[in-house]
Image (cartoon, rainbow, N blue to C red):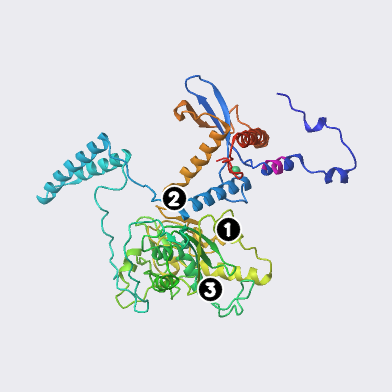
Amino acid sequence: MTQAGANDQPRTGTRAQRLAMPLARDVVRQVAAEHGACLRPVQLRRTDIAAGQVEQVLVPCGHTLASVCPPCAERAKTLRAAQCREGWHLDHEPVIEPDQPDEMQRWWIEKRADTQAVWDQADAHGQETTDLDALNSDLDEEITRAGMRGNVLPARPARRHRSTRRRQDAPDLPRRKVDARTVGKTYTARDGTTFRPSLFVTLTCPSYGKVSHDGTPADPGSYDYTRAARDALHFAALFGRFLGHDLQYFAAVEPQRRLAPHIHLAMRGTVSRAELRQVLAATYHQVWWPDTTAVRYDDDGYLPIWHEQSGNYLDPATGELLPSWDDALDAIGAEDEPLHVARFGTRFDAQGVLAGSKDSARCIGYLVKYLTKHVSDCHQADSNAQRAHADRLADALRYEPCSPGCANWLRYGVQPKNPREGLRPGSCKGKAHRREHLGYAGRRVLVSRKWSGKTLADHRADRKAWLMQTLGIPATDPARYAWEPVSPGDPDHMPPARRLLHVVADRITWKQALDEARRRAAAQGPPDLPATGRAA
Ligand SMILES: [Zn+2]
Ligand SMILES: [Zn+2]
């Protein structure tokens, strides 16, 4: 292949005229984006094992952020919307029946039962069980490798048992009839038409102080940033509490303009507003962590020292060991209050939505709207007040412990869980402290297990199968090919600019084939190909 060098091209016009011309490479990116082609394709070498033929294949990067790869992020969003749509108004129970165990799986379980019996006997006679322990854990690994989920024995109970006594100030959870169905109730109107409504719910955090329409506090001095920071840090756990009963949901977490997280949920079936209000009032999450009222070690020079031999942090002046994470937890007494109690705000939104309605399409749009953006990019700060508000929240999050392993515990005189060298309060690497996360480090999309009965990979495979069928491409046996990544040092490595040209050409070919297939289908009979269909 010969390529013309840049120097061979004739120069035209003045310098200003030349500068006004778009850069060819920028145009390639733009055209690629317009065609929905990945901007950062990954190169793989595909070998047909039988024929020995080698081919270069470019696969999409699959990134979910539009700031990284807009076409891939858009595709990921479309896939989430499909997942949401499919589960929302489901009219049949999703089948999640585990497969019957095969011979090999039975054999491993029998083996494991044998060694357990021997272990129990040895233990009862006060004999050494180290070898048997090792054998048992080997067998447990084999059991997992043989394609079985979970463990044969329940996990050991946690070291600490907190009182499960409900807080005095939280009303009791409403009693709910246990219903094995996960499909929403069907109603029949007088004229015989049936409909099955579902819910679109938005849950927010409580108020931290009055805010203006731009999301900034009316009085920054009295706005409760500490509470806002802690609620954001524990928002995922609080949502987990809300899901106490067997609820089917597709949920997306995103920030409000005031930068507090809120959650949109598509829920299958309906619950009355009164019942929802009751559940929300009774839902809380207690954080039983050590007290952080007193700052023991501040930034400048006076910080706990790492002691390599014992793997502990020491007081820099006295050389005394700082209490370990477990010791600090044990020191929390029966009379103590939890460090934080997270709750939802009393304001919530719930609306009934019918399958296939305009409303349902609008709500799905809401649910996936911000998924291609970082939490902090959902609302750009345009004013100084907004920037100052974001700064104050980031400040509040800086020293707030994000997890038991957070470096910030040293500030309050406690060793983080599993301590290691180099921890410095205020510099925890936890995602939650980073500006772009606004304190929420959990997953952005949360989907219940029986939502559509499919994983995201299943939904992706559905789309791919649809495309292959539309284009009339026969499915290939995955065992036919061997795949390997191509690294920059390899002779067949393609530089990014060339890859981009290839994927643009591929997309155009494909688009033509798809249009052609649609035309043929339309000519043959009733069209059943969705106009919005996209490749996996
Ligand atoms: Zn991409
Ligand atoms: Zn942290």
Q: Position of residue 338 (x, y in %)?
A: 37, 73
Nearest-to-viewer mark from 1 and 3: 1
Residue shown at 49% from the left, 41% from the top: 462
Q: Check disc 1: other Cα within 10 Å, few if <14, some if 14-19, many if 20+.
A: few
Residue type beneath disc 2:
Ser
SS state under label 1: helix
Asked whether residue 396 is in view, the answer is: yes
Residue type beneath disc 3:
Tyr
SS state under label 2: loop
Residue 225 marker: 3
Which of the two discs, 2 and 1, labels the residue nearer the N terminus?
A: 1
- State the residue position of label 2: 452
Q: Can you say whether 534 is above or below 393 in the image?
A: above
Q: Nearer the viewer, residue 18 or 58?
A: 58
Q: Marks 2 and 3, how far apart in space?
A: 39 Å
Nearest-to-viewer mark from 2 and 3: 2
Tally the numbered discs.
Answer: 3
Nearest-to-viewer mark from 2 and 1: 1
Q: Position of residue 429 (x, y in %)?
A: 50, 58
The span shown in magenta is 28-32
Q: Main secondary structure of the magenta part?
A: helix
Residue shown at 50% from the left, 19% from the top: 51
Q: Marks 2 and 1, how far apart in space?
A: 21 Å
Q: Is residue 305 magenta?
A: no
Q: Nearer the viewer, residue 465 or 299?
A: 465
- State the residue position of label 1: 358
Which of the two discs, 2 and 3, labels the residue nearer the N terminus?
A: 3
Q: Check disc 3: other Cα within 10 Å, few if <14, some if 14-19, many if 20+.
A: many
SS state under label 3: helix
Q: Position of residue 352 (x, y in %)?
A: 50, 64
